[in-house]
């Protein structure tokens, strides 16, 4: 009998995920790999996907932030992206997005995250066809040829990586896209989930003078404070948006922030964030990977304040590498591993989604 592995499968919006068994591939392609999943981070995006807020093919195995151990290597795959030798048993991560390299966006515009044929693990690769294992919430994950694999250094805890799973490379991409940080700038971060907290790390490491973090979940704000945020503001402590904007101006000498990073995924936060920017400041729109609907926005604010607004979608392999290097260097300083709030067995994937949705944990992790 063929060996099998379990996976948690998302088949329709809002329905509980169901455990399914799939046969393991009998043969591995020459440049492919099969990993045994050690940890799969549950991202806010998974919650949105579960609610049907992004059109994706189903059924799908969720999970796009995966740490695994090499179970089988294709005959021609013996090194990771940086040339480190790869062997069975090695602990690795991989870039969840695979771009084609040949479409207009890959070859000409050089924006692989907008590849016209982009495949993303745990998001748009259905598990209906063999080799099935295309998401992290499973015992195994099959890495097709072309996936960028990074061998993990010893001493870097798995928890530190999954805690900021896709958030870290997403944030690196967003900062890069906005032209990076300048020393001495004041930064506002809207939302203290993993993307917000990693933005805090990048802002502090980038030489920010003052970092102000807003959220409505007190435990997340406490995490931000512990990590070094200068000010944390609970949005529920204010009567209205005007008061929050006024508070940010008060904390920034009446000028506003040089850079505001939207990591809340709340459409209503956007115009408020524009108003928190200083004139000619930068607004990084990162939090709306899924479609959360519309909010009234007054374009006059953009013109009058000369705002520079940038959007960034997902991440390319270079953002993974750069994020990994940052994590390796600072995980202990910021206690990144401690952001993992709760671990769930594969069977409890639905509860993990619920815990993230309710903001009970900064990060939930599935350990198959
Ligand atoms: Zn994610
Ligand atoms: Zn492409």
Image: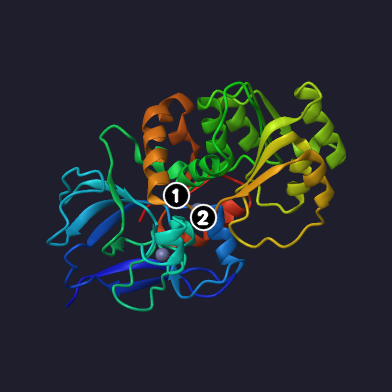
Q: Is residue 119 visible?
A: no
- Residue lying furthest left: 75
Q: Is residue 188 above or below residue 128?
A: above
Are the residues tagged 1 and 2 within 8 Å (C-beta)?
A: yes
* Residue under pointer 1: 365
Quarter of the displayed picture in which ligand 2 can be seen: bottom left
Name which residue lies at 56% across and 53% down.
44
Q: Does 142 sit left or right of 216 as displayed?
A: left
Quadrant assignment for the N terminus:
bottom left
Name which residue lies at 25% across and 43% down.
82
Lower sequence index among marks 1 and 2:
2
Name which residue lies at 75% across and 61% down.
294
Q: Residues within 10 Å of mark 1 (few under 14, many from 20)?
A: many
Q: Is residue 44 above or below residue 100?
A: above
Q: Residue 357 versus residue 204: which sits nearer the camera?
A: 204
* Residue under pointer 2: 352
Residue 73: image location, x then y, percent: 17, 59
Q: Is residue 58 above or below residue 175?
A: below
Q: Does 296 sit left or right of 347 as displayed?
A: right
- In space, the residues marked 1 and 2 are separated at their CA atoms by 7 Å
SS category of the residue bearing label 2: helix
């Amino acid at each position: 009998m063929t060996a099998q592995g379990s996976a948690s499968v998302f088949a329709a919006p809002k329905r509980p995920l169901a455990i399914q068994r799939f046969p393991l591939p009998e043969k591995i392609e020459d440049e492919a790999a099969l990993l045994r999943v050690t940890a799969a981070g549950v991202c806010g995006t998974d919650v949105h996907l579960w609610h049907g807020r992004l059109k994706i093919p189903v059924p799908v195995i969720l999970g796009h932030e995966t740490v695994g151990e090499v179970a089988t290597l294709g005959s021609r795959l013996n090194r990771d992206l940086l040339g480190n030798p790869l062997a069975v048993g090695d602990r690795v991560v991989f870039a969840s997005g695979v771009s084609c390299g040949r479409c207009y966006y890959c070859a000409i515009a050089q924006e692989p995250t907008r590849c016209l044929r982009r495949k993303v693990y745990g998001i748009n690769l259905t598990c209906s066809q063999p080799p099935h294992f295309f998401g992290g919430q499973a015992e195994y994950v099959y890495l097709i040829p072309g996936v960028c694999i990074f061998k993990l250094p010893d001493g870097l805890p798995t928890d530190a990586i999954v805690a900021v799973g896709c958030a870290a490379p997403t944030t690196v991409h967003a900062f890069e896209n906005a032209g990076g940080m300048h020393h001495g700038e004041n930064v506002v971060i809207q939302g203290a989930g993993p993307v917000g907290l990693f933005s805090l790390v990048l802002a502090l490491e980038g030489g920010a003078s003052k970092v102000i973090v807003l959220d409505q979940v007190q435990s997340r704000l406490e995490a931000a404070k512990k990590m070094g945020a200068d000010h944390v503001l609970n949005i529920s402590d204010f009567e209205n948006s005007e008061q929050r904007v006024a508070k940010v101006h008060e904390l920034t000498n009446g000028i506003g922030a040089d850079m505001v990073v939207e990591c809340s995924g709340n459409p209503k936060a956007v115009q408020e964030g524009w108003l928190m920017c200083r004139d000619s400041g930068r607004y990084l729109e990162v939090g709306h990977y899924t479609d959360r609907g519309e909010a009234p926005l007054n374009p006059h604010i953009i013109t009058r304040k000369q705002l520079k607004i940038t959007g960034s979608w997902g991440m390319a392999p270079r953002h993974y590498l750069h994020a990994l290097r940052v994590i390796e260097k600072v995980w202990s300083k910021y206690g990144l591993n401690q952001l993992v709030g709760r671990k769930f067995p594969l069977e409890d994937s639905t509860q993990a989604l619920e815990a993230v949705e309710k903001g009970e944990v900064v990060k939930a992790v599935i350990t198959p």
